[in-house]
Structures are given as C-alpha cells and as structure tokens.
Amino acid sequence: MASRKKKLQGLVAATITPMTEHGEINFSVIGQYVDYLVEEQGVKNIFVNGTTGEGLSLSVSERRQVAEEWMTKGRNKLDQVVIHVGALSLKESQELARHAAEIGADGIAVIAPFFLKPWNKDVLINFLKEVAAAAPALPFYYYHIPALTGVKIRAEELLDGIQEKIPTFQGLKFSDTDLLDFGQCVDQNRERQFAFLFGVDEQLLSALVMGATGAVGSTYNYLGKKTNQMLEAFEQKDFSSALNHQFCIQRFINFVLKLGFGVSQTKAIMTLVSGIPMGPPRPPLQRASREFIDEAKASLESLDFLSSTDLKDGNLESCS
Ligand SMILES: CC(=O)N[C@H](C=O)[C@@H](O)[C@H](O)[C@H](O)CO
Ligand SMILES: CC(=O)C(=O)O
C-alpha cells in the first residue's frame, strides 16, 4: 500500500537537467538550483526527469544519478520529489521505479509508451500497472501528455476504475488543453483523494476553477513566485487579481510561444533569470538562438519578471 503522505499540492517545478557545454550532466549546480527554487521562487516540490528535464534523452544510468542528486540536495529543503520513470522499455521503467523507491522519492510518474503505443485504455493500464508494481510503496501519478506521446486515450476514461488496477494510484499530471476531459477527471473522482496536477501553465487559472489541486510546469522554475501570487489570490477568492496575474503570465508565454518555445528555450530563460548555468540541451534539441534570448529578456524585463529593473520606469505593461 502506498504511504499516504500529505497530498501533493501547490506548484511543482518540472526541473531542467543542467548540462555542461560538452553535453554532460552538470551535477554541480543542483544544490544551488534547489536553493533558488525554495528561496527565490517559493517552490518546494519538484518533478524530475520529465519533459523539461529531457528524461527521455538521458540514459538509465544518468536518470538514476540525476534523481539521486535531487534527492540528496533537496533533503530537508523540498517537500516532495516526484521522479518521472516512464520509458519505452517496461524493464527500464521498472528499474527506475525501484530505484526511486530506494532513494526515498515521494512519488513516481509515468507517461504512456510512445513508440509501440497502447491502443486502448486497458492496454495502457496494464503497462502502467506493471511499472507501479515495481514500487509498491510509492504514490503513482499518470502523466497525460497526448501532444508529445501521441497516445490520445482520454484521462477521464483512464481514471475510471484505476484504483482497482493500480492501488498506489494517487493522481494525474494533466498536460493538455482539453478542460472538458480535465474537469470530468475531477468531477468523477470527487470522493477519492487524488491529486489533479495541471500542466499547461498559461491556462492554470481555468484549471483551478475546474478543481486542479496543484500544477506541474516548466515556467514555475522562474515564474513560481508570480504564479504563487495567482494561487494566493485564487485562494482568497480575489478572482480579478488572480486573472491579472494569469494574464501577465500569458503575455510572456504567448510572446515566447510565437518565437518558438520548448525545452531549449526554457534552459536559456532559466539561465538568464536565475543566473545558474543550465547549459545547452542534448541533441536532437538545439540550443536557443541569441535572438530568442534577447527577445525573451526584453519581454521579461517589460513585464517586470526579472530582478533587474532597468526598463521598468514608465512601462505601462508592467505586471508587478
Ligand atoms: C509540453 C510541455 O513541456 N509542457 C510543460 C509541462 O507540462 C509546460 O510547463 C509548458 O512548458 C508551459 O505550459 C508553456 O507552454
Ligand atoms: C513540464 C513538465 O511537467 C515536464 O517537464 O514534464
């Protein structure tokens, strides 16, 4: 039986995997990174080796080392560490799940296998069940990200009866814009203590209205503080302030999405905002262009999302 520890709530940063200029993992900055999230962004939960962490571009041995480093450096500082252990090979996924349990992680998450794909709900559940069973004491989260996996089985359908198949099932990380599907996941499972973690940062407020209990995302690495203000306003039922915060966040995300925004760009933005070198991404991803970085910087400054306040004066767009 999974240890029913405190429900995962609030913001969860999808961690970047820092790399050296030579493309090796730069473990040396992870301690600093933990402190930055906790102290500067007010974010105390992390999601390791996911999309943002290029988990599927790392070897199994690298994934184990990265997970260990976050656990070590996060001890007594972070609330919860969830490790993504999804892989195309069930064996690898199980190895990573067992490893997550050994190192004391707070939960594991798994995406749908995305090469030879499950074609219906039962087939997907069977795969997930085998992974979950390798870590029978760890809370299990399904990571729904259909745009990247190509597995479009609706989350609402998957959740129907899931606890009978996967007793450790504890929640859903929902990275899709289908708020009907998300809302129905919440509505149909009201009496269960699941965590509903939303993963589209630019739409989080709508998901909060639908009953999201938390959020996992890449932008919480550097917009955690801002997003926490939105959560706070929502909690206080100050919906107009919450909406202002969401619109500010949207202006930034909308701006970078139009320039082309993904993991490479997240690495560059985090380097810029935190001052911690995240390094280049691993191929097939390519590093963000100089033009992107300059434009993103100007946008962050004009929205007052950077500590440097050079461009602040007289800026009508400022979101502070
Ligand atoms: C596809 C992807 O990486 N999604 C992230 C997490 O699920 C989000 O945090 C996005 O990066 C963010 O919402 C910006 O679109
Ligand atoms: C964004 C996210 O949740 C991930 O990197 O997996």
Image: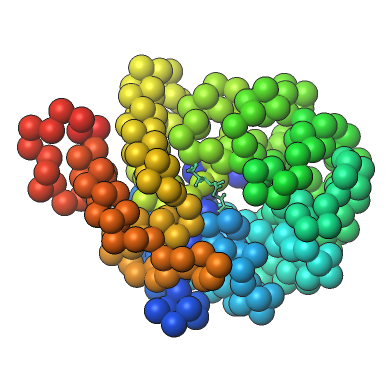
Image location of residue 97, percent across then percent down: 75, 65
Q: Is residue 34 above or below residue 14?
A: below
Tell me: 123 left or right of 307. right
Colour scheme of the rendered structure: rainbow
Image location of residue 65, percent across then percent down: 60, 77
- Quadrant of image for the C terminus: top left
Residue at (70% x, 27% y) in the render: 181
The picture quadrant where one finds residue 293 is bottom left
Tell me: 314 left or right of 123. left
Residue at (65% x, 65% y) in the render: 56
The picture quadrant where one finds residue 61 is bottom right
Residue at (11% x, 44% y) in the render: 311
The picture quadrant where one finds residue 207 is top right
Q: Nearer the viewer, residue 152 or 286?
A: 286
Residue at (42% x, 78% y) in the render: 20
Is residue 66 shown to the viewer in this render? yes
